[in-house]
Amino acid sequence: MVTSSWADAQAQTAASRRRGAVLEHAILDAALEQLSTVGWNGLTMEGVAAGAQTGKAAVYRRWPSKEDLVADALRAGLPPFDAAPDVGDVRGDLLTLCLRARDAMFSRPGLALRSVIHECDSKRAERFHAVIFEGVVEPTIRMLREVIERGIERGEVRADAANSYVFDAVPAMMMYRSKVCGSEWADVDVEEMIDLLMVPLLRPEGS
C-alpha cells in the first residue's frame, strides 16, 4: 500500500523540475479541472496537488485556502477581453462582442465559476461574484459603451443610447437566459437578441 507521505514525496520530487510560473500554472489548471469534474464541494487541496503532480505543501505555500486558490484559478483562466471589436457597423460589432461574451460564459473557467456560485454559501459566493463582474461583466460593459458611442458618431445609433440601462441590457439578458432558462446561447440565439432587442433599441428615431 502506498502511504500518503510517500506519495507526497514522489510528487515533490516530480515537481522539483517545475518551479515558479510553470508550477503555478499547473496548479491553477488542476484546480479548474477539479471544479469542472467534482465541483466546489468536491474540490480539495489534496486533489489539486495530485492533479498538478506536486505536493500539498507547494499548493498551501502559494494559496493558504481553497477560496484563494479557486479565485486565482478563475481569474487566470477566464478569456481576456481586450479592445472592442470594430467590423464597420454597430450590428456586427455587437454580434462579435456578444459571441465573445458567450464563449467566456461557456468556457471551462466560466462554467467552473458558475458552478462555484451555485454551490457556495452566500458569504463565500460574494467573493466569486466579484470575479465574474471584474472578469466578464465589467469589461463587456466597457466595450459595449465603446461600440455604442462609435455607433453614435457614425449616425447608426440614437444620441441618448449611451446610458447604463442600455449597457446593462446584453449582460442582463445573457445571464438571465443562461441561469433561469438554461439557454446555451447558440449563434442564432445571439443574432436574434441583437436583431430583435439591441438594433431596435439603438436605432435613431425615424430610421
Image: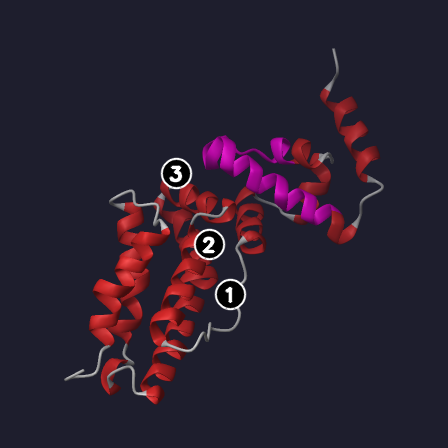
Residue with the mark numbered 3: 119
Q: Is residue 198 above or below residue 21?
A: below
Q: Seen from this angle, which residue lies furthest top?
A: 1
**Residue 3 appears at what percent x and percent y?**
74, 17
Q: Which of 117 and 193 is in front in this view?
A: 193
Cα distance in 3D space between marks 1 and 3:
26 Å
Residue type indicated by callout 2: Ala
Residue with the mark numbered 2: 104
Q: Residue at 56% of width from left, 52% of height from top?
A: 77
Q: Seen from this angle, which residue lies furthest left?
A: 206
Left or right placement of residue 178 versus residue 10 in this view: left
Residue type indicated by callout 1: Phe
Under circle 2, the secondary element is: helix
Tell me whether the residue at label 1 lies in contact with that at label 2, contact meaning CB atoms closer than 8 angstroms: yes
Residue with the mark numbered 1: 81
Classify 10 Å Cα crowding around label 2: few (below 14), some (14-19), many (20 and above): many
Q: Pick the quarter of the image with the N terminus.
A: top right
**Residue 54 appears at what percent x and percent y?**
74, 36
* Region rendered in magenta: 23-48
